[in-house]
Amino acid sequence: MTPDRLAFDLQRTLNELQQERERTQKLLGELEQQNRELDRLRNSVHREANSRLLAEEALDEARDRLQLAVDATGLALWDWQLPATQVFLTARWGELLGDIGADGYWEVADMRARLHPEDLEPLRVQMMALLEGRIQRAVAQHRVRTANGWLWVETHGMVAEHDSKGKPLRLMGTLSDIGERKRIEQDSERARELAEQASRAKSEFLANISHEVRTPLNALMGLTRMLMDSPLNAEQTGWLDLMDSSAHSLLQLLNDILDLSRIEAGKLEIEHARFDLRQAIEDACAPYAEQARAKPMDFQLVLPEALPQWVLGDTGRLRQVLSNLLSNAIKFTPKGGRVEVRASLPEARGDAPQQWQLQVRDTGVGIARKHQDNIFDAFTQADASTARRYGGSGLGLTICAGLARLMGGDIALESELGQGSTFTLTLPLREARTQEPSPLSASAELLGMVQAGPRYVGLVVLLAEDHPVNELMMRQLLLRMGCTVRVARGGVQAIAQWEQGGIDLILMDVQMPGMSGMQATRDIREIEARRRLPRTPIVAVTANAMAGDREACLASGMDGYTAKPVSPQALIKEMDRVLQIEEAPAEASTVPGDLTPLSPMPEILDKPVREASHLEALDVEKLLRRLDGDEDTLRQLAQVMRSDLASRQIELQRALETRDAMAAIAHAHGLKGSLGSMTAERGARLAKGLELAARSGDWHLYARALPLLQVEARQIDLALAELLSPENRDLFDTRH
C-alpha cells in the first residue's frame, strides 16, 4: 500500500471519527433534554398527585361538614333518577317513620301510600309542575303516616339534571320534620280563638255592666235635678252640684270605656252620611267657646273659604274627636291662655286622595317628649300628677286615635313642655256633590203628584210587595199618579206576572218570603238575556237602608233604589230617572189655590192632645198627606195594620222563646217597613233594633228590646183604633 493511499484512508477515518463524535454529542444533548423533560414530568406528576390528594381531602371535609349539617338539622335527603320507580332516601327518612334508619331505595308507590289523603292533590300539582318544567323548585307541607300516627313534614325539591331537550332527568331535595312548628301554630290559633272569646266576653260584660250602672245612674241624675229644683240653701245647692258633676263624670267614663271596648273588638261602625262640615265644626266648638270665655281665655275658630260645605263621613264621631281634643285643650290651658281650632286643605301628593286637616292648638302646660310616644295608649296621661291635678281617666286620646283610624285617617301630636300642644287630625276628604231632596210640605207634595200624573197615565207598574200595609200604601200612591197597578206577593209571583208581558216598570221589595227581590231580579235579567227581550226597569223599594244596600240592589240587576217609608217625591224622581222621563217644568213656584182644599187635615188634628193622646204614636198629618187626604184608604190601612201588628208581636215573641233568628229577622224587618209606611217612626226604630239584635244573635238585647216594642205597639194600636172610632169617622165625614 502506498503512502498516499494510507494517508487518504487515515484522513477518511479521521473524518468519520469526527462525524461520529459530533453525532455522539448531539445524542448526548438530546438525552440531556429528555432527562430534563422526564424530571419536569416527574415533578408535575408529583404535584398533580398532591393536588388531587388535597382536593380529595377538601371534598371529604366538605362532605363531612354537609353530613354534620344535615344530621344537625334532622333533614332527610332524597334523590330520584327519572323514570325510575324508586327514590333514594337517607337514613333519616327511616328514623322519621319509626323504621330502620339506613340509606336505601323506596318504592314511589309505597311512599304515595303513606301520604295523607287530603295532601295528595296539592303534592301531585307541585310534582307535575316540576316534571313539566314549569317550575325549578318546589316546597310543600304535608302529612305522612308513621308508626306513631301522622307526622307533618316539609319537602323541598328541585330539578338537578336535564336532557338535551330540557326535560328533567333527576330530582333532588330534602325532607324535614315540622311537627313542632305545626303544634306551635295550632297553639297560636287556639290562643287567638281564646283571645277572641275573652274579647267577646269582655264586650258582653261591659254591655251588662253598662246596663246595670246606667239604670241607677239615670235615677241618681234625675233625682239630683229634681232636688235642685226644690227649695235649697247654699250649702245643699253646692252638694247637689258636686253630685251632678260626679254623676256626669261617671257617665262620661262609662261611655269612654264602652267606646274603647267597641274599637278594640272591631265592632264600632263608622257612618258615611252626608253632612255640613262647616256647621258640624261650628256646632262642636260652640259649647267649648263658651267655656273658654268663662275661664277666661281666648278662643278662635278658623275655617278657610275653600273648605267644602257638604262632605261624606260620620259627623257624630268627628264631633266626638273634636270635643275630646277641645276638652283637653281648655282643661290644660291656664287662664289668659289661647285655644285655636283651624281647618285646612293640604296639597295632595301625586295620585294620593285629597285630605283635610283639623288642628287644635293650645298654649297650655304641654307634654314632655318622653311621654309623647305613649300618650295615645289607654289609661295613659303625661304623668301621675296630671291625674291628681286635672282628673280624667286617660281614655280620651286613645278613643280619638282609634276613631281617626276607623275614619281612614290619623292623629298626630306636636308639643313642648310649657309651650302648649297641637293635635292634628287628618281625614280623607269625600265631597258630597249632590244633595238628597228635603221633605216637601203637604201642598208641594200634592202639586208634585198632580204634575207627575200626565207622565204616568197608562203606565203599567208591577208592585212586588208581600206586606199588606205597604201594598195598600204603594197601590194608592201609584193609582193617584195615574198608573195601572198589578200586585205580586213574592218573587216567584213577580216573575210569573212579568212573563205575561205588558209591564212597563217593576217596583220590587227586597226581603220577601220564598224568593227574595234580588233573586227575582237576577232571574228576570237572565230570562231577558236568553230570550233577547228589552230590559224592564226595576226599582228597589225596601226597608234595607243601611250602607251598601243600594249598591247590593244595583249589583243584582236593579236600575233604581228608594227606601221605605216611601216619599212620593223620592219615588217620582227615581221613576223618572229609570224611565228616562224629563220632568215637566212647573208653571208657577207657588201652589195653585184650587189645590188647597183638596186635602185639608181632619178636625181631629185640631183637638187638644188630651183628647187624642194615642195619635202621638203616628204622624197622622204626614200619613194623610201621603194618601192625598183619602180617609177611606186610611181606615183600610188602619184595619190591616192592627191585624198585622198583633200577629207580628206573637211571632216575635215565639221567635224569642225558640231562639229562631230567621223568623225574628223576617218579622222584625216586615214590621219595620209597615210601621215606617204608617209614619210610626218610634215603632219602626224599635223594630229595626230588634232586627239588628236578631241578626247579631244577641238574644239578651232582643229580650230587652221586645217589651219596649210591645209598649209602643199598644200605643200604635190605640191610635189606629181611635182613627177607626165612630167619633173620628163623623169628623172625617163632616170636615168639608
Image: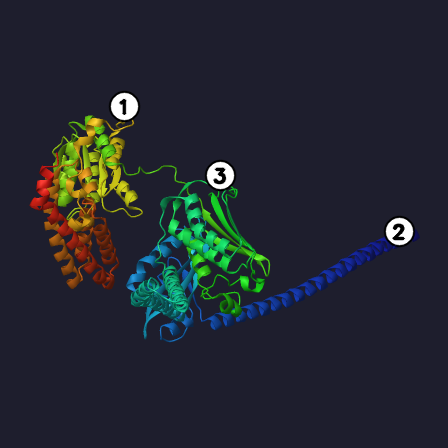
Quadrant showing the N terminus: bottom right
Say whether disc 2 or disc 3 marks the residue closer to the N-terminus.
2
- Mark pair 3, 1: CA separation: 37 Å
Q: Nearer the viewer, residue 519 or 128?
A: 519
Q: Is residue 228 visible?
A: yes
- Mark pair 1, 2: CA separation: 159 Å
Identify the element where label 1 is drawn.
loop
Q: Looking at the rendering, which quadrant does residue 500 occupy?
A: top left
Marks 1 and 2: CB-CB under 8 Å? no
The nearer-to-camera label among 2 and 3 is 3
Across and down, in percent, residue 269 comes to 35, 54
Across and down, in percent, residue 68 comes to 51, 72
Residue at mark 2: 8
Which residue occupies 31% across, 60% down?
120
Residue at mark 3: 306
Q: Amino acid at mark 1?
A: Glu
Identify the element where label 2 is drawn.
helix
Residue at mark 1: 587
Q: Looking at the rendering, which quadrant does residue 130 occupy?
A: bottom left
Density class for disc 2 (Cα within 10 Å; few <14, some 14-19, many ≥20) is few
